[in-house]
Image (spheres, rainbow, N blue to C red):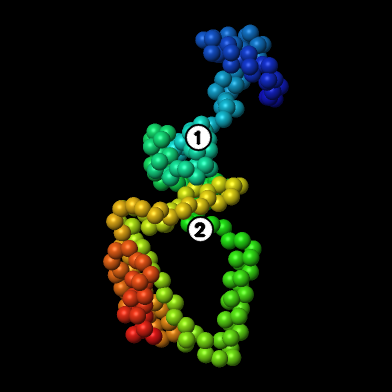
Amino acid sequence: MGRGASFTEQERGRIKGLSEAGLGVREIARRVQRSPQGVPNVVNEKSDAQPKKKGRPKALTKRQTRQVVRAAATGDYTASELKATYSLSCSLRSVQRLLASMDFLTFAKMDRTLPLTPEHKAARLEFAERMLLAAQKEKVWELIIFSDEKKFNLDGPDGYKHYWRDLRRPPRRYLSRQNGGGSLMVWGAIGYEGKSELVVLEGRQASHHYIWTVSEHMLPFA
């Protein structure tokens, strides 16, 4: 026995509509004038609707994502501040992953100094090249000692400030503070033969204090 003609889209829609209205298979077949054997196939066929996605739902809505990214691009918020500001229920790590996924955002260290001019860069390069050439002809590094001091702030960051930088904008900079809470300052030196002891400096360091530090600690090291 041969198969009947396939159902048209119009017939399929009518059959499904009659089925949803509560009509039985034989009554539907009578109304569309088709065989009762084919009607159940149309009624039970899968819908073309998009299947539901499996897995966990997204931590942030599209609106929250736009708000967070827009605020982060200003450079004024950390990930934890964004989470608190927008009352996000997701984890801090989710906010960090979102920001890290943006091509135009990067977690960068804020420069503490003013930008170098082309003249500054050229002078530094010239000094390095001159020292390299001099070291090939005579003893240079054996005669040089590098020394510096470092102040650690006891009530806050020591200048290591990071922020979410929008790569489409110039980098941000900040100036170090002159007044604040307690601090600890140390001094040290390195040279060809090794390094000096680490010296703890007390109080504010004026020129005569620095002369004393050099005479007491650098000269013996040299």
The amino acid pointed to by label 2 is Thr
Q: Quadrant of residue 195?
A: bottom left
Q: Which mark is residue 67?
A: 1
The amino acid pointed to by label 1 is Gln
* Secondary structure category for the residue under label 1: helix
Is residue 94 in sight in this rendering? no
| Image point (41%, 46%), residue name | 93
| Image point (41%, 79%), residue name | 190
Q: Which mark is residue 49?
A: none
Residue 82 in the image, given as x and y percentages of width and height: 43, 39
Quote the CA–CA distance across marks 1 and 2.
Answer: 31 Å
| Image point (61%, 47%), residue name | 168
* Secondary structure category for the residue under label 2: loop
Q: Residue furthest bottom?
A: 138
Sequence-wise first label, 1 or 2: 1
User: Badge 2 is on which residue?
Assistant: 113
